[in-house]
Amino acid sequence: MLRTCRQLLEVELRRRGVSFAHDIESGRHVVQRADGTRLLISLENLSREFERDNDEGRIARFVDSVLGSGSSPMVWQEAESRLYLALEPSDYAERSDLARAISNRVDRVPVVFDDEHGAMSWVTQQMIGDWSVTEDALIRRAAENLNAALRSATLQSDQVDDVQVAFIASALPFKAALILAPDFRAFVEPTLGWPLFAVAPARDFLYLWNAQHREFASRLGHVVVKEFTHSAYPLSAEVFELGDKGLRAIGEYPVGA
């Protein structure tokens, strides 16, 4: 009989001699790291990934990322090159204490991304205090790093009837967040013009097209809902407008209708 993601995680933690408990209220695992840090672990995203490929090695890699990144507190000089702005759903039981609403469904959250382990963790107020930096300084550095990732990315587009539709090829696994980069307009405008419409149903999924083709949104509903409901890291089934006044949601595809 195939073991569940939850069972495999607990087997892996026991194998490594890592103590854990269950948080009855949230259903998450409580893990004590070697440095004394207490972690609350949600398996929601990991379970979605495991259901797609049944790769048991994914569980061990997940535990590596949880335990390996915390052997000692990260100092600012180590953290600053790993800071990014990310898009996260706003319906988590516990939202980031640094979250800023983009829409009713999506937050902007500063994160630390460990490229070696492929692990992303939210920045907390305590981390800012430990680093002796201001929140504004941290956000600026995260935006600079997002710009650097944007410079390494490429914009690819296809003609769908009379509409130019673009997506971004990037090594960043949460590439939908590139829409937050300060230089995003300069990156996309030569190809698509300005303002734009966008959909970002998952962390790694972003479609863009010129706002003069407003009706094109009606043709993407099936794709957006499919990605949103099946992705390991869903974001939102909303349609966004990017213009001179910033980023805002202008509509939402029905999910589960």
Image: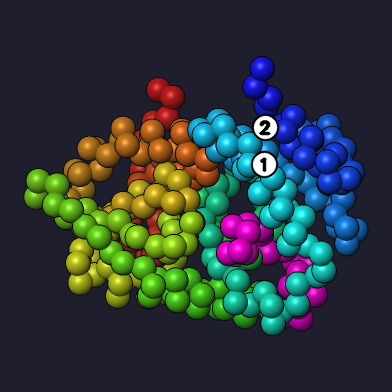
- Where is residue 115 shown, x and y percent of the image? 58, 64
Front residue of this view, candidates 56 and 51: 56
Residue at the (63%, 42%) spot, across then down? 57
171 lies above or below 161: below
252 lies above or below 4: below
- Give, as a single range, the part of the protein colored magenta: 113-133
155 lies above or below 44: below
**Residue 113: quadrant of the picture:** bottom right
- Where is residue 3 shown, x and y percent of the image? 68, 25
Q: Classify residue 115 as left or right of residue 22.
A: left
- Where is residue 15 shown, x and y percent of the image? 83, 41
Q: Classify residue 248 as left or right of residue 141.
A: left
Quadrant holding the N terminus: top right
Q: Where is mark 1, residue-wise?
A: 59
Amino acid of disc 2: Cys
Q: CB atoms at circles 1 and 2 under 8 Å apart?
A: yes
Q: Could one spot residue 250 in this view of the protein?
A: no
For label 1, the crowd category at 10 Å Cα-Cα, with few meaning under 14, some 14 to 19 and many 20 or more, is many
Quadrant holding the C terminus: top left
Q: Which mark is residue 110?
A: none
Amino acid of disc 1: Ile
Residue at the (65%, 22%) spot, across then down? 2
Q: Where is mark 2, residue-wise?
A: 5
Residue at the (60%, 77%) spot, across then down? 81
Q: Could one spot residue 55 in this view of the protein?
A: yes
